[in-house]
Image (spheres, rainbow, N blue to C red):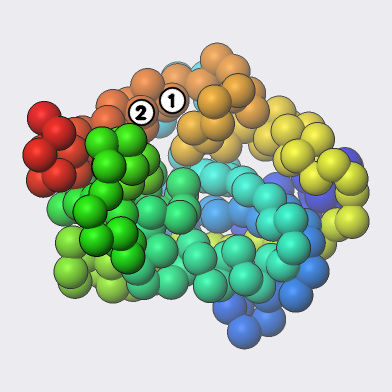
Amino acid sequence: MTAAASELGAREPHVPLGELPNEPGLYAFWPKDAGVTAALGLEDVPGAVPLGERVLYIGKAEDSLMSRVGSTHLADGKTGNSTVRRTLAALLDMDSCPRHNNISSPTHGQLLDLTSHYGLEGAEEGRLTEWMTENLVIRVAPSDWTPLEDLERAVGAVLCPPLDQAKKPLWGPNPWRQPVSCARERLRLRARRKAGLE
């Protein structure tokens, strides 16, 4: 656990997309500088490590860091499958919509899921990917720890990522959890209105 926390707890060196390992492990997104968190509308809290100097988000890749980070989190059209993309889109107040799908006539229950895990309209997907690529630093810690969720929770309790939105929080009290949750709810409701649910 200590090795993973050490790897993810350092901003540098940035891991380029082309060098992401094709193996399981944990990953982290750092802000490139303090201006990044200001753009997200987040403010420092007295007594806490400044946002520009801490990990914003950590997650786990059960199969492949290359696939989870490169092909999901940093890929256009994948917002509905990525918690961190939905969170950043919400903080940037992007235009949400029901998650893109191939269901011709979705049921009410399916619409609830497609809007809870909302996507983004048109060019917003590419805009978000570009923003993430330009403003975030990627760190990885390959690991065969089983179950990987236990390692994620242990590292999360040490690094305290402010964008954590896990149902069972990785750490607490998190002073940024509520404003992040409110931003996500705003985009969820926007997507539900477009689906005729609100």
Residue at 59% in and 24% down: 169
Say few, some or many: other residues with alpha carbon within 10 Å of mark 1 (under 14 / 14 to 19 / 20 or more): some
Quadrant of the rendered image containing residue 77 = bottom left
Depth check, mark 2 against mark 1: the one in front is 2
> What is the three-letter code of the residue carrying label 2?
Ser
Q: Nearer the viewer, residue 60 or 51?
A: 60
Quadrant of the rendered image containing residue 130 = bottom left
Q: Which residue is mark 2?
A: 181
Quadrant of the rendered image containing residue 21 = bottom right
Say few, some or many: other residues with alpha carbon within 10 Å of mark 2 (under 14 / 14 to 19 / 20 or more): some
* Rendered location of residue 177, percent (x, y): 43, 25
* Rendered location of residue 143, percent (x, y): 86, 57
Q: Which residue is mark 1?
A: 177
> Given contact means CB atoms under 8 Å apart, are the residues at marks 2 and 1 in contact?
yes
Q: Name the quadrant of the N terminus.
A: top right
Above/below status of 154 relative to 18? above
Is residue 51 visible to us here?
yes
Is residue 91 visible to us here?
no
Looking at the rendered structure, which numbered label has been put on residue 67?
none
> What is the three-letter code of the residue carrying label 1?
Arg
Residue at 60% in and 64% down: 68
Secondary element at tag 1: helix
Q: Nearer the viewer, residue 7 or 95?
A: 95
